[in-house]
Image: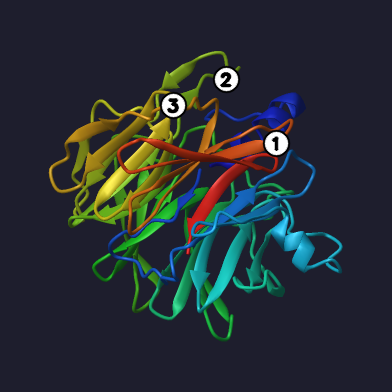
Amino acid sequence: MKYKSLLVFSVLLAAIAVSCSKENASGNLPTGIDIEVGENNTLFILNQGAWPSGSTMDVKNLSTGAFSANWFATANPDVAQGLGNTGNDMAVIGGKLWVLMNGSNQIAVVNPATGKLEKTLDVDSPRYIIKKGNYAYVTSYGAAINGSVYGVKGKVYRIDQASYESKTVEVGYQPEGLTVLGDKLYVANSGGYQADQENTISVIDLSSFTVTGTLELPVKNLNRLFSAQGKLWVTTYDCYNADWSAIVTPASLGSVTPEGEYTAVPGVTVGMPALSKDKLYNVSYAGMQVVDAATGEVSAIALKDAQIGYPYGLAVHPVNGELYIADASFTGDSRVLCFAADGTFKWSQTTGIGTGPMLVY
């Protein structure tokens, strides 16, 4: 979710002038990109914290139920700054857990077995990460998040998973989600810090790592981007009026062909999305919905025997279809709730402050 809405409480208190509310979902098996698969028995849980306090990470063993609170800090007692501020996304790349710290302008490279910090990479306001081939691709706002990102074009980092050498290419304003379809990398530009939000997807040739085109959509303030069934699937953020008193345009979901033909998917209350096995899962205050990427049909999963106050993260188990939903609090402990694929409640785990991004490995 966007930095300013990830920190919605502090942002509003600080009266930062923005016009659209801004995620994250991992633990999915989307088509197009490469996923490094572990034993699928570990759930990494990223707690964003309440700004300006730092983020923390918890780990739950899905086989035994064992839970390790504040896993990263316990493994790294000598790292004074801890994990950093405002964790936004995670991925396992080259056998290492890459954790994007948006507020700290860095990526923490962590041993997924021990939690030990192995390296930090300097990246201006990293947003989302995917892997394709030997590279990690990371969207960036193009300037340090604690500086000024207004009027600054965003960029995509291509980082070698072995050497960590990087190269960048400029895209639109405040890029968010990204994915691969065919031999192209697609990047959703939000423009959420601009007076007029973006309605574009940047198209990057993977072999040359250059921008070769732009898709213009009839919707603005783009957020997450997935690929399935030969199409792109893009969500948008809610757009508010100048004083945040009303939503002007609700968040939306649509499919996009490689040529840029947009088709809205009606009946979806967009919240936290995740893609698994060509099904786009979405959890919001309205409940759990699933979009079949092959047919575009929308169905609901009734979540039984548990109430979710503030759904802020979603992961889907790639084998058994279990659903892990972060119910976040920014003033105290959050929790993660687990449901079977049919919506049957299984367990609840108390976690840290501001629980959001999760990853099954």
Question: Dot 3 surroundings within 10 Å: few (below 14), some, or many (20 or more)?
Answer: few
Give the mark toward the camera: 1 or 3.
3
Q: Is residue 12 above or below residue 147?
A: above
Query: Mark 1 = which residue?
Result: 333
Query: Mark 3 = which residue?
Result: 305
Q: Position of residue 101 (x, y in %)?
A: 66, 56
Q: Is residue 55 above or below residue 266?
A: below
What amino acid is at disc 3? Answer: Asp
| Mark nearer the N terminus (3 vs 2) | 2
Please name whichever residue, 77 or 89, is drawn nearer the observer in this view of the structure: 77
Please name whichever residue, 285 or 63, is drawn nearer the observer in this view of the structure: 63
What amino acid is at disc 1? Answer: Asp
Please name whichever residue, 359 or 243, is drawn nearer the observer in this view of the structure: 359
Outermost residue to the left = 295
| Mark nearer the N terminus (1 vs 2) | 2
Q: Position of residue 130 (x, y in %)?
A: 44, 64
Outermost residue to the bottom = 163
Question: Dot 2 surroundings within 10 Å: few (below 14), some, or many (20 or more)?
Answer: some
Query: Mark 2 = which residue?
Result: 242
